[in-house]
Image (cartoon, helix red, strand yellow):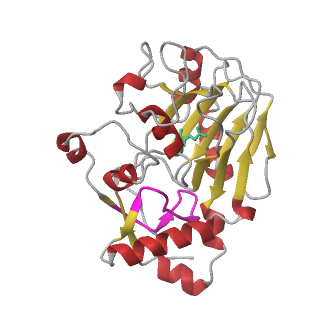
Amino acid sequence: MKFSPLHPSLGALVEDVDCNDDFLDQADSLKTALAKWQLLLFRDQDLSDSAFLEFCRNFGTLELLPEPEKRHPEFPEIFNLSNVKPDGSLTHHDDPQAVFLRGTSRWHTDSSFRTIPCLATILYAVTIPPQGGDTEFANMIAAFEGLSENDKAKLATLKAVHSYAYSRSTNPGELEKMSEEELTQVPNVVHPVVRQQTDGRASIYLGGHVSHLDGHDVVASRAQVRDWEEQFTALENIYRHQWRQGDVLIWDNRSTLHRLTGYEIDKYARVMRRCTVAGYEHVVGSSSS
Ligand code: OGA
Ligand code: MN
């Protein structure tokens, strides 16, 4: 496998790989490369659904996402990220499905509202709009490393409250209603603002599921967190991915934020197969720089 940087800050193109191949002996190298580069791109892939699933399993155990209606009928670990309805028509801009998809346009890291958040997300591009619909990825290790020693030390003392109820309430429109009982299954969780990576580096762990800082005034600390997100997603920390059909892209949710950039959601189809690699550890904070 050959890794070439996609951007000065993060991401590598992995060349000479057919994701249909057997990676039994190389799964550890793939996992190490993901932690190192934070994002890996495999271009021009041609994968059946079962081959995509097999490839994703090299990175760890896969999550089953909560919404059964979006699961692949045969392979429930595959989530259909799509603005196309079962009858082939496109979702309307304000349909709950489109609101959910447009909600990913805010900087976030996937499932940070869980006690043990996911490790990585993998998308396989099936249908790409002719314009728009890029995805941006921001390097949160670089964001941390760019801070002064004082700020590093200060942030390392803080914890953030990640709340699914909060991030749902800030979606750009009405989602399907969730019952009180469903909401009680996703209680607020607290994670350190500075996260320790397995390779010893540290990153900032915030994003759209963060409601506020634990133990701080909700309104003031929420505003502070949103300011930081803007500061930490400075242009030099961002790789913007322009999708091509056949791309397989995996990003490390432990050390990056991402967001969808706009496209005409009721005009162009955008279809991705998605798998989510489960995390296996509690988020551990860092007091070192
Ligand atoms: C996601 C996500 C963005 C995109 O699948 O978690 O944020 O560009 N997707 O589809
Ligand atoms: Mn996401």
Q: Decide: is 75 above or below 194.
A: above
- The picture places residue 65, in percent across and down from the top left corner, at 39, 33
> Does 199 appear in magenta?
yes
Q: Decide: is 229 above or below 79.
A: below
Residue 255's quadrant in the figure?
Answer: bottom right
Extreme residue in the bottom direction: 150
Residue at 52 percent of width and 28 percent of height = 57
In the image, taking residue 195 as reference, residue 237 lies left or right, namely right
Front-lying residue, 26 or 150: 150
Judge whether residue 10 can be spotted in this image: no
Front-lying residue, 92 or 103: 92
Residue at 50 percent of width and 68 percent of height = 226
Residue 161's quadrant in the figure?
Answer: bottom left
In the image, taking residue 98 as reference, residue 63 lies left or right, namely left
- The picture places residue 257, in percent across and down from the top left corner, at 57, 54
- The picture places residue 210, in percent across and down from the top left corner, at 41, 61
- The picture places residue 162, in percent across and down from the top left corner, at 37, 59
Q: Quadrant of the C terminus?
A: bottom right
Q: Decide: is 264 above or below 287.
A: above
In the image, taking residue 118 as reference, residue 161 lies left or right, namely left
Q: Quadrant of the N terminus?
A: top right
Extreme residue in the left direction: 181
Judge whether residue 231 can be spotted in this image: yes
In the image, taking residue 54 as reference, residue 186 lies left or right, namely left
> Does 191 appear in magenta?
yes
Residue at 64 percent of width and 32 percent of height = 26
Q: Which residues are magenta?
A: 190-210
